[in-house]
Each structure stands twice: as C-alpha cells, then as structure tokens.
C-alpha cells in the first residue's frame, strides 16, 4: 500500500514538473519555382564605347528556391515556469535550404537566445532580430520574403552587406540590419493597454588596449515602441550600427589615419485592418555616415584632416491585403531615394552629369496566397523594379529582385559587370509553404 502511495506521489510530481516546462519542435518548409531577370546599361550613356562593347546586358535565371512566402527554418523553443510569475525560456532557430538540403542545423543563425520574463517584462540575451528591422517586415504585405519584398528591405540589405560589419570589405562581424549577435534586449510586459516596446544593445566585443582608443566596430544600439489595439498597429524604431571604427594611433610625431562609419536607421510603420482590406504604410530613412581622418605634414610638422560624408536612403511603402475566401491578395508599391552627400564634382567624361546625382528605385509587387489549411498554402508573386541613375549609388545600382529576397545580396542576377549599372529587374515566385 505504501509503495503504491509513493508511486502515485512520484507520478503526481512528475506531472507537475512536465506541466511547468515545455519544449517545442517547429519549422517551415517553403519551396518555389522562381525566375529573375534584369537589364543593365552602360553607366555613362554619353561615353563612346568600343564597337564590340554592347550598350545593354540582359541576365536571367530560373531556380528552385526556398523562402518565397515564409522563411524555411527549423527550431526548438521551450519555457520553464519558475513560479511567482517568473519564467525562463530558450529559442534556437536555424535557417534551412530545403531546395538542395545543403543547410539545416549547421548553426542557429536565425535566433539563439535565452531569457527571463515576468511582470517586469523580458530580458533576452543572444542573437536576435534588431529592433529596427521589425517595422520593415511587419508593415510589408510580403513580410520581406520572396520577390515581393519591398525596395526598402532590398536597399537596407545591400547597405548592410556593402557597408556593415559583415561586409566583405569590412572583415568579420555581424551584419546588424536584420539580426545582431551578442545582444542584450529588454521587452516591455504585454499588459500595458496595447503599448509595446523594446530596447537593444549589442556588444562590439573588440579588444581594449590600455592607452589606446577602443574600436566600437560591430556595436548596435536601438529601440522600438508601438501601440496595437483592435485593427490599428503603429510603431516607430531607431537604431545605430557601427559598421567601421578604426581609431587613429599616434606614433611619435605621426598621427595614423582613422575611419568611422555608422549606419543610422529610423522608420515609422502602421497598419489598419478594415475587414474587407488591410492597409500598410511605412516611412524610413537610413543614413550612411562616414568620417575619415587623414594625416599630413607641412614643413615636417604633422596635422590631421577630417572629412565627413552622409548619404541618405529615404524610403516609403504603401500596401494592402484583401482576403478572398480561403485566399489572400497582396499588393505593394515601394520607393527608395538615394541622396548623395558627396561634394559635387563635374564628371569629365559626361559634362551633363555630376558625381553626386541622386538615384531612385521604384517597385511594384502583386501576389496571391491560397490557404489549403492552417499550415499549408500555395502562393504566387510577381514584382517589377526600376532604377534611375543607379550608377551614383553602389547600393541602388546593384539592387535587383533576386537580391531583394535576401538569398544572395551580393551576388547573382543584378550584379552587373564593370562599367554597367542596373536599370530594371523583374521576378516571380510560384510555390508551396508548409509549417509545423
């Protein structure tokens, strides 16, 4: 009898323990037949090209891709109830290339966090989405996936890949546009009458040497605050990423060169669900702030010259989703205007142009999603992108529909040969998405 009571007590304790903690396996498998095409022209239309050099180049590619509607992923998450309203959680999520099976669980690059939460909110540590990225994806009808991803997302992604800490020319480090590593985040509790928000700081983790200025390369600081109640959702976010930071070093009478590059992002997004249709809108601005310090000498006496340049990428988006039975129509128009901060200099090869001409990218996207169930959907998307004066912006000049889906921001269709610049791009996705 006593043994039976002990056994029952043990089972009861085990039941309580299992109820207090949980671990979930989850994922998305998304595959599509996708086609990308682009047109490029000579960067200087007034230049006299050799006879054998074509004035225009066309590129195209058809692939079996992934993540056309939702990002393919595989992950584990869990929560333990610590009592008194306190809980501990973890989230490990890996991107997955199910089109070729080459990548899955090789790392947890999408998210790898551990957190404590309670009545005070949540403190989260690890690799996570940046606070400023959320508005770009939440207020985009296409959710920054597939060819319909906005021109804002495409420009910011290329800006991070070309200028950010993870850029090929910038050495190792985390790009801090979509996600950032080594972050400390705080989230407001969910019981504030519809108000929500977060602040986030990512450590640069650079070595500090006594007597020398510490590099802040890889540092990110940002925050997002919003209000969601009923059909309305509106949020504003700001963040700053230190893309490069090489302090000057004084050796004797010689002052070494220095460089500091910061990418500031500010965006405001909103959505309103009328029932028959849901409207989306976003305004954004990314500032590429570059400061160079150069040493020089006059009559053997050293001095330091500092030059600064701030380029701006101003973006806007309007979009809509319309439910139709088991389906959903999606559409958006997005635009990014590049404002060059360089001092105007007449281009000798082209008297009618200056090196600081502004550039613009305009994109239209249309799509349809048909839900076969809560977890399985068929989708189709088509998008068209046009670029004006792209030769004056390395970011807009290399942007394309293929790059906008985030699979390959620095290579593939849309990266024109030297002397050519992107003028237009078009793409489509036809695919299926299953979540579990």
Image (cartoon, rainbow, N blue to C red):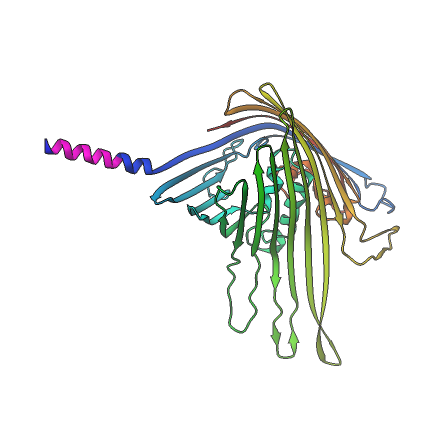
In the image, is residue 256 above or below residue 116? below
Q: Quadrant of residue 270?
A: top right
422 falls in the magenta region: no
| Front residue of this view, candidates 47 and 13 | 13
Quarter of the rendering occupied by the N terminus = top left
- Classify residue 288 by image quadrant: bottom right
Up-down: is 304 above or below 360? below
Q: Residue furthest front?
A: 193
Indicate the position of residue 346 as horizontal and vertical percent values.
86, 56
Q: Residue 6: horizontal and vertical position, in percent?
A: 15, 35
Whether residue 407 appears in this view of the structure is: no
- Is residue 99 or residue 382 the one in the foreground? 382
Residue 7 colored in magenta in the image: yes
| Percent position of residue 160, x then y | 63, 49
Task: Farthest residue to the top: give it.
Answer: 325
Q: Name which residue lies at 72% across and 44% down.
A: 396
Kindly tell me whether residue 98 is visible in this rendering: yes
Name the one closer to the observer, 106 or 287.
Answer: 287
Residue for point 65% across, 44% down: 268
State the image quarter where residue 22 is shown.
top left
Please tell me whether the stretch drawn in magenta is mainly helix, strand or loop: helix
Say above or below: 234 vs 392: above
- Left or right: 425 in relation to 178: right
Span highlighted in magenta in the image: 3-14
Judging depth in this view, the residue of 348 and 373 nearest the camera is: 373
Quick check: 129 left or right of 311?
left
């Amino acid at each position: 009898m006593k043994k039976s009571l002990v056994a029952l007590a043990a089972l009861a304790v085990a039941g309580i323990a299992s109820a207090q903690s949980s671990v979930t396996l989850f994922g998305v498998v998304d595959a599509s037949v996708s086609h990308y095409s682009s047109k490029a022209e000579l960067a200087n239309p007034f230049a006299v090209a050799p006879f054998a050099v074509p004035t225009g180049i066309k590129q195209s590619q058809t692939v079996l891709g992934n993540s056309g509607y939702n990002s393919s992923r595989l992950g584990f998450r869990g929560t333990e109830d610590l009592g008194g309203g306190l809980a501990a959680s973890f989230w490990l999520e890996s991107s997955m290339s199910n089109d070729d099976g080459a990548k899955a669980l090789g790392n947890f690059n999408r998210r790898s966090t551990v957190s404590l939460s309670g009545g005070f909110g949540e403190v989260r540590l690890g690799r996570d989405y940046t606070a400023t990225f959320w508005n770009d994806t939440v207020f985009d009808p296409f959710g920054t996936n597939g060819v319909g991803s906005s021109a804002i997302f495409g420009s910011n992604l290329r800006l991070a890949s070309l200028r950010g800490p993870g850029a090929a020319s910038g050495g190792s480090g985390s790009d801090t546009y979509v996600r950032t590593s080594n972050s400390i985040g705080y989230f407001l509790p969910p019981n504030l009458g519809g108000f929500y928000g977060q602040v986030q700081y990512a450590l640069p983790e650079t070595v500090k040497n006594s007597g020398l200025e510490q590099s802040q390369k890889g540092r990110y600081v940002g925050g997002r605050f919003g209000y969601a109640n009923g059909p309305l959702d509106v949020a504003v976010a700001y963040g700053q990423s230190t893309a490069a930071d090489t302090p000057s070093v004084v050796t004797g009478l010689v002052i070494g060169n220095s460089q500091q590059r910061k990418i500031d992002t500010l965006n405001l997004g909103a959505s309103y669900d009328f029932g028959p249709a849901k409207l989306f809108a976003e305004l954004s601005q990314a500032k590429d702030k570059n400061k160079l310090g150069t040493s020089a000498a006059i009559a053997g006496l050293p001095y330091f010259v500092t030059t600064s340049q701030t380029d701006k990428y101003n973006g806007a988006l309007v979009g809509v989703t319309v439910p139709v039975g088991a389906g959903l129509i999606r559409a958006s128009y997005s635009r990014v205007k590049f404002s060059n901060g360089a001092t105007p200099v007449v281009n000798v090869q082209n008297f009618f142009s200056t090196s600081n001409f502004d550039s613009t990218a305009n994109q239209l996207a249309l799509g349809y999603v048909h839900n076969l169930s809560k977890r399985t959907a068929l989708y189709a998307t088509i998008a068209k992108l046009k670029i004006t004066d792209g030769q004056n912006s390395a970011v807009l000049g290399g942007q394309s529909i293929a790059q906008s889906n985030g699979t390959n921001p620095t290579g593939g269709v849309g990266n024109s040969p030297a002397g050519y610049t992107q003028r237009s791009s078009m793409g489509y996705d036809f695919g299926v998405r299953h979540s579990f």
